[in-house]
Image (spheres, rainbow, N blue to C red):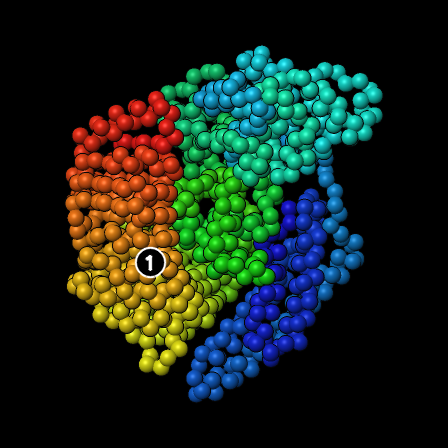
């Protein structure tokens, strides 16, 4: 497979040289020659896409290009860092460091020439040995891989009973006479082929259909061979059939199917255009014919099928049953191994591929407690083992089929710890900070976060990332990756020097990884000297620490040893409650784009953030899951490039300088601002012209209602504001913010722990789609929404509103409501009758409501089921 990481590095360097040309004017000639070489190397990589697999000479050449590219990256970064630091100095400091600048210029010129000589040698070897990326497909290897995949997936896997029954019923439904395509979707190794085979061999299926056929499609299919395979399922093929042209074969298949009720399984479909190519071969005669497709890719399956079936993972009991069947082959598991065996089965996380392969390994090992203990915590290592390629090749099919732009994004997910719940917001912001999006987005100039979200959806649709939870608007909130895929990502990343993961240790290898993820218990930062990391620190572009406790010494250690990092993230389960400032040395991290400190349980207590951070020219995201005691430095207003500013427990905005022109023009997210009398002035000055998401709070201090009204009224200047969250405010009878509601772009409003809340003004927001009211004291005991109010509202959530007793809904109010959730409204006596007349309503969820209301709604629930009402009423 072609090195996707190397392709990204080459493109990134090309773009960097173009966009930062003003930094290179003193070494312009050397850098221009280097740029030409980078383009040629990248062109060779693109020509090698999918062609160099198995060619040792091509692999070696790509390895040499990788080393040259990384060396070039280090040279460019060294020079850029020196130039940026020189520009940040005052006149006296510049004169004092002039000699340093001259030395660096000389070193860069020498190193650039060294890289050039290395590249010239690569070209010479390429010509000398005649290395070309030959386009060839090793059919024997392809067939071997497909056979191995089927052998694993078509084992007599237990489970799938419910899945088989559901799909068989759907296939045999005589009320649906039109030809239908049904698809099974899931990640590689989940058992799609096994389930399809169970359905295909089902007696009811065989008896119902006149003609049944099975074809294996795969990535590199040949339409002619597929047609012949389908014809073979009818009976022997005459010799003259093989002599027919492709078009004649298509007509033959169509004629053979005409007048018959047929069932065709197309296993392992990868390409979107496949169904468009073959759909005309299958007549639609309203006789209940069916086609079943299996695919790892949602887009492919959905394109052909209106009813995709998402195959779930195995549960713990079924995983254990399957492991026993594979290991003991009908015999009972010895009692002394059952506890350990269940632990091993559970570690496969419900993936049949993992269970079957693990079972095959254990079946050939001694069945002793000591032998099995060696596998605990190491199951994925045995499964991904390169020498035996038990699972890696099957998983690599999905990776190799990814577009080039998605490969680095997918590999990157492996930096997170095992079983980690990944925030989609964090992941997409990191992709942007790393440059994965801008490299691909150079010509479109679309919003990079939006593109990153599309990339995430693309990986989800390809069954490589799983959705853990969704936002109210349907977007991904959190996601996860299966352990086996995570280990595959780590293995590939080590090969491509993309990143390395260190668990419970800080020692760095001599491989010079470009990114480093340190996980587990590490408590010896102060004992790590700079000399132990100096040989590696120049190459590390991103550093992630996932620890049990957050220790400020880790922050000091990182800033002392890794001066070229672009992303710096510390995530811990907890922290020691003591105030510390962010070290002044953070201002030396001139390439920093993303900075995050967070804890899972509790919050971070920072004394201050130094002014030096504000001079960093590329910093886009500052995320502190906690509070900043002394507020933000007054220099924050010079950070034109800042996009996301978070402080989970509140931040205080300083007053801008008296001179004009100090606006945070690129800031899109500001959360959470501690409001005071100065806040009104800041928003009225239009200092955040492109703000899209805002959270205001006053939980650290009390402010009166009139001040809140002034602050909300001042938000009219935020012309691009889409998401607003208010917490711990005394809102009062009227929200002045919404007096110009017809021009408001607000799509989501959350009100949390506020007093005297009145929802009347919110109903006039013409673009509002999501409204959440939680733990608030309401201004009235009655909700009354009038005709025309909330015209676009799709999601309405009321949680912990103990004051509300009745709810009235006029006709034509909330006409587009789709999802209603009510929780802990313990005095609510009714839901309005008009609610059930809303044409778009799809789901109503209720929990912790009064018993009388619950009983009424349970009666309603039964009636809705009898009447076939499309809305789901869920009562917890």
Is residue 390 or residue 749 the one in the foreground?
749
Is residue 622 or residue 839 the one in the foreground?
839
Q: Count residues near mark 1 (Cα–Cα under 10 Å), then give few for <14, some for 14-19, many for 20+.
A: some
Picture layout, residue 696 above or below residue 816:
below
Is residue 814 or residue 435 the one in the foreground?
814
* Percent x, y of residue 92: 43, 88
Residue 773 visible here: yes
Question: Which residue carries the number 1 mark?
Answer: 741
Write down the quadrant of residue 341 in the picture: top left
Q: Residue at x 35, y 31 (%)?
A: 872
* Percent x, y of residue 688: 37, 68
Picture layout, residue 838 above or below residue 106:
above
**Quadrant that contains the C terminus:** top left
Picture layout, residue 804 above or below residue 124:
above
Q: Is residue 537 left or right of residue 811?
A: right
* Percent x, y of residue 307: 51, 30
Q: Is residue 841 left or right of residue 162?
A: left
Residue 344 visible here: no
Q: Residue at x 65, y 74 (%)?
A: 30
Label 1 secondary element: helix
Q: Residue at x 25, y 52 (%)?
A: 760
Q: Residue at x 25, y 59 (%)?
A: 735
Write down the quadrant of residue 225 in the picture: top right
Picture layout, residue 870 above or below residue 486:
above
Write down the quadrant of residue 196 in the picture: top right
Is residue 833 or residue 690 the one in the foreground?
833
């Amino acid at each position: 497979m072609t090195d996707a990481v190397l392709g990204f590095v080459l493109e990134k360097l090309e773009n960097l040289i173009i966009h930062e040309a003003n930094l290179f004017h003193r070494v312009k000639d050397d850098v221009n020659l280097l740029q030409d070489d980078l383009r040629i190397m990248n062109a060779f990589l693109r020509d090698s896409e999918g062609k160099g697999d198995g060619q040792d000479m091509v692999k070696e050449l790509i390895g040499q290009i990788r080393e040259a590219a990384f060396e070039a990256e280090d040279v460019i970064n060294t020079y850029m860092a020196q130039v940026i630091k020189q520009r940040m100095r005052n006149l006296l400091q510049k004169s004092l460091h002039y000699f340093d600048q001259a030395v660096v210029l000389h070193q860069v010129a020498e190193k650039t020439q060294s890289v050039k000589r290395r590249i010239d040698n690569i070209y010479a070897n390429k010509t000398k040995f005649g290395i070309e990326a030959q386009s060839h497909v090793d059919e024997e290897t392809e067939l071997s891989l497909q056979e191995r995949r089927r052998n694993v997936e078509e084992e007599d896997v237990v489970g799938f009973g419910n899945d088989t029954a559901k799909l068989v019923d759907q296939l045999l439904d005589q009320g649906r006479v039109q030809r239908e395509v049904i698809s099974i979707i899931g990640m590689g190794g989940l058992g799609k082929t096994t389930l399809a085979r169970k359905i295909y061999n089902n007696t009811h299926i065989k008896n119902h259909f006149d003609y049944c056929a099975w074809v294996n499609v795969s990535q590199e299919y040949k339409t002619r061979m597929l047609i012949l395979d389908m014809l073979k399922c009818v009976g022997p093929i005459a010799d003259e059939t093989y002599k027919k042209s492709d078009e004649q074969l298509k007509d033959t298949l169509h004629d053979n199917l005409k007048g018959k009720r047929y069932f065709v399984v197309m296993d392992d479909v990868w390409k979107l255009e496949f169904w468009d190519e073959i759909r005309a071969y299958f007549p639609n005669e309203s006789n209940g014919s069916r086609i079943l497709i299996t695919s790892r890719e949602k887009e492919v399956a959905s394109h052909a099928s209106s009813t995709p079936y998402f195959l779930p993972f195995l549960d713990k009991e079924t995983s254990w049953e399957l492991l026993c069947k594979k290991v003991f082959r009908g015999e009972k598991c010895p009692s002394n191994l059952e506890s350990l065996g269940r632990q091993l089965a559970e570690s496969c996380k419900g993936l049949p591929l993992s269970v079957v392969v693990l079972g095959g390994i254990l079946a050939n090992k001694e069945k002793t407690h000591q032998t099995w203990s060696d596998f605990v915590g190491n199951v994925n290592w045995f499964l991904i083992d390169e020498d035996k390629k038990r699972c890696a090749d099957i998983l690599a099919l999905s990776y190799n089929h990814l577009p080039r732009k998605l490969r680095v994004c997918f590999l990157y997910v492996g930096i997170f710890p095992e079983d980690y719940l990944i925030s989609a917001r964090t992941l997409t912001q990191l992709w942007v900070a790393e440059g994965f999006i801008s490299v691909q987005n150079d010509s479109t100039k679309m919003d990079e976060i939006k593109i990153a979200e599309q990339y995430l959806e693309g990986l989800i649709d390809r069954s490589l990332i799983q959705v853990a939870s969704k936002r109210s608007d349907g977007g991904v909130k959190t996601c996860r990756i299966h352990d086996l895929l995570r280990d595959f990502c780590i293995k590939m990343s080590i090969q491509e020097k993309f990143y390395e993961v260190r668990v419970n240790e800080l020692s760095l290898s001599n491989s010079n990884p470009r990114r480093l993820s340190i996980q587990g218990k590490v408590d010896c930062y102060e004992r790590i000297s700079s000399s132990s990391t100096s040989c590696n620190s120049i190459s590390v572009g991103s550093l992630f620490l996932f620890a049990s406790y957050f220790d400020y010494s880790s922050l000091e250690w990182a800033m002392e040893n890794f001066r070229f990092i672009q992303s710096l993230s510390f995530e811990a389960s907890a922290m020691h409650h003591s105030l510390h400032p962010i070290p002044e040395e953070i201002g030396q991290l001139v390439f920093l784009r993303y900075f995050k400190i967070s804890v899972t349980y509790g919050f971070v207590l920072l004394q201050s953030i130094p002014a030096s951070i504000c001079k960093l020219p590329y910093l886009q995201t500052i995320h502190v899951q906690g509070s900043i005691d002394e507020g933000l430095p007054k220099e924050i207003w010079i950070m034109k490039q800042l996009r996301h500013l978070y402080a989970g427990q509140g931040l205080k905005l300083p007053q801008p300088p008296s001179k004009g022109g100090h606006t945070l023009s690129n800031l899109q997210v500001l959360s959470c601002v501690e409001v005071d009398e100065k806040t009104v002035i800041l928003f009225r000055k239009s200092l955040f012209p492109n703000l899209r998401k805002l959270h205001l709070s006053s939980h650290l201090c009390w402010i009166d209602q009139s001040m809140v009204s002034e602050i909300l009224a001042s938000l009219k200047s935020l012309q691009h504001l889409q998401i607003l969250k208010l917490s711990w405010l005394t809102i009062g009878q009227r929200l002045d913010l919404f007096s110009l509601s017809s021009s408001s772009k607000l799509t989501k409003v959350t009100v949390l722990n506020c007093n005297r809340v009145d929802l009347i003004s919110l109903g006039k927001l013409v673009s509002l789609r999501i409204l959440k009211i939680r733990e608030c004291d309401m201004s009235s005991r009655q909700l009354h929404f009038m005709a025309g109010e909330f015209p676009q509202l799709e999601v309405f959530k009321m949680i912990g509103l103990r004051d509300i007793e009745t709810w009235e809904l006029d006709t034509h109010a909330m006409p587009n409501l789709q999802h209603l959730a009510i929780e802990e409204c313990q005095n609510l006596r009714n839901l309005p009758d008009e609610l059930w007349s809303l044409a778009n309503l799809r789901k109503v969820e209720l929990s912790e409501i009064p018993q009388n209301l619950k009983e009424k709604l349970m009666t309603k629930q039964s009636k809705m089921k009898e009447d076939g009402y499309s809305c789901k009423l869920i009562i917890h």
